[in-house]
Image: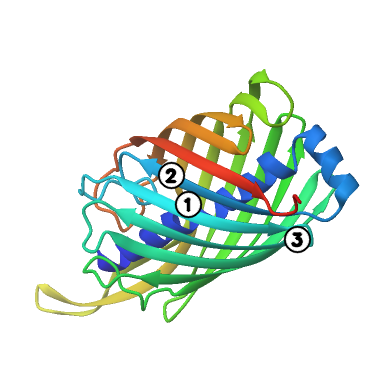
Amino acid sequence: MKNLLAILALLISQSAFTQEIDSVLNDLLFEDQELLSLMEKTKNYQFLYTSINYRNQTYFAGRDVGIDQYNMTGQISYIHSSGITAGLAGILYSEFEPQLNTTIASIGYGKSFNKLRLRASFDKYFFADIDTLEESYFNSSLTVGASYRLKHFRSSLNFSALLGPEPSTQASWDFTGYINLWKKGYQKRLRFEPGISFLFGNESVLSTTAQSIGSRGFLDNVVETETLVEKYGLINTQIRLPLNLTYGNFDFEVGYNYNLPRTLDNEATPLSNTSFFNISIGYLLDLGKK
């Protein structure tokens, strides 16, 4: 169980950080045509983005592990016109001891080609010493991804290699759309941004086979063989229904999220669907302004 929690905690930790940076890059920098026009004229920009995200319930890859707790994610990210990104994030769980459970440092590079954006990043994880998570399982990850936008629609595909003594992989595929409910330029707007994401990963399945090799009277002599098989497949599907307000350099979000976790072969009972609310506030600072 400890190994499973470590894997799931890393999945949610990385998703909270790398997807947030990708969302900022696309929503604030690479989607709005008015802002794009301004950026094309300057061709040299740098931004600092900070945010705090609160979730009223904590689920690991959509799974309820029996701990009723909220979590908070704080981050600071640097974005440069050369394509370089860097960031630091911390994740706090209300019922863990210590509460500040995971810290993530990241450095990456991204490049846009019209409506397509490619990116790569390296993330280093620092874990608190608690019973439910061991740092030795994974300590870093390497992620590559691509995003494609078409008017009010975006799709993102990410693949990550979790590095450490027990390496693993994960992938996510996101679809996001948006509807402008109110807009005055690129600095004042209210959007409804529904989305769906699919999380894929490895699972270890222990299978047992029995073989009869002869008989002694009425009883067969049976030999059992255990085989550990690694399978790759869908772990969780998440539906997101957020409202996002951008006002000047600030952005605010409130959303409802619904998880449909898929029961893995090594999980005993069918999993229940889960849901939570999130509230976030972010601030984008233009370091290029004089």
Task: Tell whether label 2 touches label 1 (CB within 8 Å).
Answer: yes
13 versus 218 height, above or below: above
Type of amino acid under label 3:
Gly
Type of amino acid under label 1:
Ala
Task: Pinpoint residue 208: horizontal percent, then vertical percent.
Answer: 29, 69
Q: Residue furthest front?
A: 290
| Quarter of the rendering containing residue 216 | bottom left
The answer to whether 239 appears left or right of 77 in the picture is left
SS assignment at label 1: helix
C-alpha separation, residue under disc 3 versus residue under disc 1: 21 Å
For the residue pair 250 and 239, the one nearer the viewer reads as 250
Q: Residue at x 63, y 50 (%)?
A: 22
Q: Which residue is mark 1?
A: 16
The tag earlier along the polypeptide, 1 or 2, is 1
The tag earlier along the polypeptide, 2 or 3, is 2
Task: Pinpoint residue 141: horizontal percent, then vertical percent.
Answer: 53, 70
Q: Residue at x 24, y 52 (%)?
A: 268
Label annotation for residue 53: 2
| Quarter of the rendering containing residue 128 | bottom left
Q: Which residue is mark 3?
A: 83
**Quadrant showing the N terminus:** bottom left
The answer to whether 51 appears left or right of 60 in the picture is right
Type of amino acid under label 2:
Asn
